[in-house]
């Protein structure tokens, strides 16, 4: 985990944390929305505005949605079940192991919490060999 501890998370942290993971490639650096991949599989990406993620009062599409893969449906539910949580999902993502987060709400997480979400996203998509190697070098505290 990189420094930052309990300070509020920022969007820049998503980029730094994702790139800090091993074997990461990034698509979308030429003006498109960034997609972070490990072994060709996305684990964090910045989503284009879509009709399933809209402001309930205005109907306008959110332009700042970040998608994080999660290890399981149970992990997903743990993140979205609490109404105070900034994480959410939509019907489009039913059955998909991921959660959504608006960049406008990222500061509700600490840097450490965001780091854990990014690392879990990477671990959920990395090969078993890569995940095992990373976990042995970074044992849980």
Image: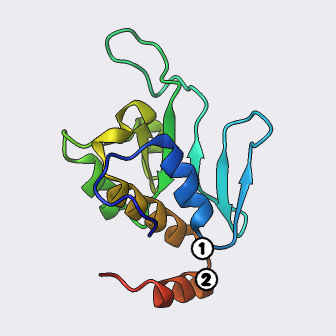
Q: Secondary structure at mark 2?
A: helix
| Colouring mode (rainbow / by chain / secondary structure / one colour) | rainbow
Label 2 packing within 10 angstroms: few (<14), some (14-19), many (20+): some
- Residue indicated by mark 1: 126
Using residue 109 as the reference point, say whether residue 16 is left or right of it: right
Q: Residue at x 54, y 81 (%)?
A: 131
Residue 15 percent location from the top left of the image = 57, 51
Residue 6 percent location from the top left of the image = 28, 56
Residue 32 in which image quadrant: top right
Q: Which mark is residue 67?
A: none
Q: How many numbered discs sit on the rendered protein?
A: 2
Residue 94 percent location from the top left of the image = 42, 46
Q: Residue at x 48, y 52 (%)?
A: 68
- Residue indicated by mark 2: 130
Residue 102 in which image quadrant: top left
Using residue 28 as the reference point, say whether residue 128 is left or right of it: left
Q: Secondary structure at mark 1?
A: loop
Quadrant housing the C terminus: bottom left
Q: Are marks 1 and 2 in contact (CB under 8 Å)?
A: yes
Q: Residue at x 80, y 38 (%)?
A: 30
């Amino acid at each position: 985990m990189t420094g930052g501890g309990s300070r509020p998370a920022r969007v820049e942290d998503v980029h730094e944390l994702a790139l800090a993971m091993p074997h990461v490639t990034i698509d979308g650096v030429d003006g498109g929305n960034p997609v972070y991949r490990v072994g060709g599989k996305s684990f964090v990406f910045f989503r284009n505005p879509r009709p399933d993620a809209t402001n309930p009062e205005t109907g306008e599409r959110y332009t700042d949605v970040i998608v994080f893969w999660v290890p399981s449906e149970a992990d997903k539910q743990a993140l979205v079940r609490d109404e105070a949580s900034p994480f959410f999902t939509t019907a489009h993502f039913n059955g998909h192991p991921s959660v959504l987060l608006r960049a406008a709400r990222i500061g509700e997480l600490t840097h450490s919490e965001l780091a854990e979400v990014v690392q879990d996203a990477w671990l959920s998509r990395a090969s078993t060999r890569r995940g095992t190697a990373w976990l042995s070098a970074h044992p849980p505290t």
